[in-house]
């Protein structure tokens, strides 16, 4: 039980997120209306992606320092799950954009930057698949992983703020804090962020164990 308490917490938070996100009262904002409920699913997935990719980079750095295969295994699996979260983040964002902005993809700077960031990580997976030597693959991939994360952060958090954007908190648009002064959304949003992060870590650790078992059977 002591080892699995965080998995129990994850399950509870996920149930709370789905119930609260779909059923709790939300502010009636112009244009957004009920679609603001997507906040509890769209934004936390991006938080989860950033945390998972950051963990991946930490293990890539550890691999470059110690040259241990287990670090490369953790790095690739956390990157895998992080990118999956990023894909779902874009898909939920497109769903929200269709109702809030009138089209699935409007060429918003943050949408474009997110897509470019994911393409950089897709290249990371292609790179890994193109190198046969295990040690060389792990080392080159670790270096590229650090570069990919270093490029992703300004793409998501800096460049969109330098130009006009439809996203709240960008391009002169006020953030949700300015819209929702009674903080009603925070009752679900913050637990949702923690829930998606923990879920991502859970999935990634399972994938790491599976990969280790596959390597042991070779």
Image (tube, rainbow, N blue to C red):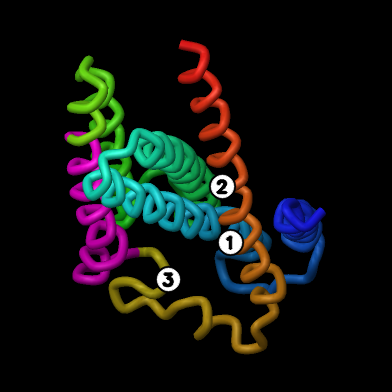
Residue 49 covered by magenta stretch: no
Magenta stretch secondary structure, dominant? helix
As measured in the structure, the alpha-carbon distance from the residue carrying label 2 to the one carrying label 1 is 18 Å
Q: Which structural element holds mark 1? A: helix
13 left or right of 59?
right
Reading the image, the residue beneath label 1 is 39
Reading the chain from its start, which is encountered first: label 1 or label 3?
Answer: 1
Crowdedness near tag 1: few (<14), some (14–19) or many (≥20) residues, C-alpha within 10 Å: some
Residue 14 visible at all: no
Residue furthest out toward the top:
218
Residue drawn at (51%, 34%) of the image:
208
Magenta part of the chain? 140-165
Q: Nearer the viewer, residue 195 or 164?
A: 195
Q: Which structural element holds mark 3? A: loop
22 left or right of 86?
right
In the depicted structure, whether residue 73 falls above or below residue 59: above
Q: In the image, residue 37 lies at what x, y percent?
A: 65, 60
What is the tally of numbered marks visible in this picture?
Answer: 3
Residue 19 visible at all: yes
Q: Nearer the viewer, residue 55 or 50?
A: 55
As measured in the structure, the alpha-carbon distance from the residue carrying label 3 to the one carrying label 2 is 25 Å
Residue 142 covered by magenta stretch: yes
């Amino acid at each position: 039980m002591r080892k699995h308490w965080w998995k129990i917490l994850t399950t509870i938070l996920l149930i709370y997120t789905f119930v609260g996100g779909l059923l709790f009262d939300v502010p009636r904002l112009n244009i957004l209306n009920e679609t603001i409920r997507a906040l509890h699913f769209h934004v936390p997935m991006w938080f989860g992606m950033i945390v998972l990719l950051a963990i991946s980079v930490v293990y890539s750095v550890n691999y470059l320092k110690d040259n241990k295969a287990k670090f490369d295994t953790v790095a690739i699996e956390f990157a895998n799950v992080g990118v999956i979260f990023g894909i779902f983040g874009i898909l939920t964002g497109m769903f929200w954009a269709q109702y809030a902005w009138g089209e699935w993809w409007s060429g918003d700077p943050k949408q474009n930057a997110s897509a470019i960031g994911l393409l950089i990580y897709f290249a990371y997976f292609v790179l890994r698949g193109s190198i046969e030597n295990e040690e060389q693959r792990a080392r080159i991939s670790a270096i590229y992983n650090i570069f990919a994360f270093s490029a992703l952060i300004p793409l998501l958090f800096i460049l969109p703020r330098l130009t006009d954007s439809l996203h709240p908190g960008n391009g002169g648009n006020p953030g949700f804090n300015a819209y929702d002064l009674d903080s009603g959304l925070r009752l679900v949003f913050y637990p949702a962020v923690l829930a998606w992060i923990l879920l991502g870590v859970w999935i990634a650790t399972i994938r790491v164990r599976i990969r280790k078992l596959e390597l042991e059977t070779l």
